[in-house]
Each structure stands twice: as structure tokens, then as C-alpha cells.
Amino acid sequence: MSRAAGLGLVGIGLLIGILGSVFLFVSMSGGGLTAGGLVVGLGLLLIVVVPLVGFGSVVFVRGVRDQQVDVSRQQDSEELRTILDMVETRGQVTLSDVIIELDADRETVHQHVYRLVGMGLFTGYVNWDEGTLYSAEASQLRDLNQCYNCGGSIEIAGKGVFQCPYCGTEYFLSK
């Protein structure tokens, strides 16, 4: 909407500028306006036109930027939903499958998994070295003492995040 408002303001400003200039030049050519009057008239016209066009341009540019941000957020949300759906429906999914499905890099997938954990939407574990995400019920992970992957003892790595110091497998508990 702000893009349309910006274009509207620019259009109104240009229309006022054109119509005002035509009126002033016609008045001067008809002898009803002196050169000094023309200069004053054009100056007053600029006082009205320049702010309208300038403000309209700023509103338009912000509207374009906001639309790009909205598209980016929507894409991120769709990628998060895709990861969550893949892991929950399959029980486990390889990172390579997620990377291919999202057409993303490993770091982006890593960040998305942490965002899902932070939002309390993903409970499970990930072996980043092996490249597999596993879905698990929170009740299975709450009393977990040993790593499913290597049998080593797991340690708290952050809020709702546990990690095996031996193989690097991370366990995520949602709220």
C-alpha cells in the first residue's frame, strides 16, 4: 500500500508542477504576468512540488523495501515449515535431503534448526557430523543420560540444548 501512496504523491506533485507551470507561462505570454512574477510563481510552485515528490519517493522506496522483507520472512517461514514437516513425518531426515529440498546451504539449515528449537517447535536430536536430524518425543529425551549415537554422557550446552562432547550429537528439548 505504501508503494501506491508514494506513487500517488509523486504523481500529484508532478501534476501540480506541470499544470502550475503551464498556467504561469500562458499568463506570461498573454501579458498578464511579468518575468518577475513568473520567477516568483515558479519558486512558490517548487515549494509545493518538491516536498510532494520527495516525500512520495521516500514512501515508495520504503514500500518496496518492506515488500522485500515480507517476501523474505514468508520464504523463511516456508523453509522452517518444510524442515519441521520433513523431520516429523519421516522421523529422521538427512541434512543433504533438507539442503536439496530447500535449495540452501548447510549453515542456513543449521540456523533454521536452531530457530525451530528456540521457538519450541522441534524436539529431537541432530548428529551434524553424520548429517541426520531425528525427531523424538520430549519424554524420551528428558531423562536421557547417554548419547544415542556413541553411548557417551551428554552435557547441557544451552537452554533446552544438550550435547555429546564425544561425537557432537545435539539434543533439543522444546518447552
Image (cartoon, grey):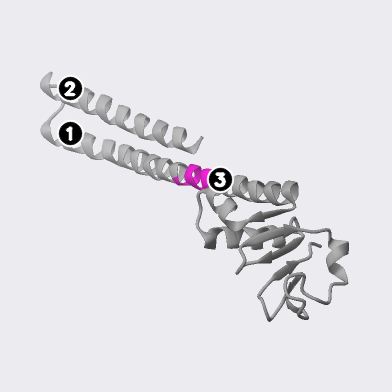
Task: Decide which of tag 3 and tag 2 comes sooner along the chain.
Answer: 2
Residue under label 1 = 37
User: Residue, x 45% and y 32% (percent of image)?
Assistant: 4
- Asked if one can make out residue 119 in the rendered structure from this viewpoint, the answer is no
Give the percent coordinates (x, y) of residue 168. Answer: 66, 75
User: Residue, x 23% and y 34% (percent of image)?
Assistant: 41
Residue under label 2 = 27
Q: Amino acid at mark 2?
A: Ser
Badge 2 element: helix
Task: Decide which of tag 1 and tag 2 comes sooner along the chain.
Answer: 2
Marks 3/2: CA–CA distance: 57 Å
User: Residue, x 40% and y 45% (percent of image)?
Assistant: 58
Task: Decide which of tag 3 and tag 1 comes sooner along the chain.
Answer: 1
Compared to 43, does 139 lie above or below?
below
Q: Amino acid at mark 1?
A: Gly
Q: Nearer the viewer, mark 3 or mark 2?
A: 3
Residue under label 3 = 75
Give the percent coordinates (x, y) of residue 171. Answer: 74, 68
**Which residue range is magenta in the image?**
65-74
Marks 3/1: CA–CA distance: 57 Å
Badge 1 element: helix
Give the percent coordinates (x, y) of residue 167. Answer: 66, 76
- The mark found on residue 138 in the picture is none
* Magenta stretch: dominant secondary structure: helix
Give the percent coordinates (x, y) of residue 151. Answer: 77, 77
Badge 3 element: helix
Asked if the residue under mark 2 is in contact with the one under mark 1, i.e. CB atoms within 8 Å, the reply is yes
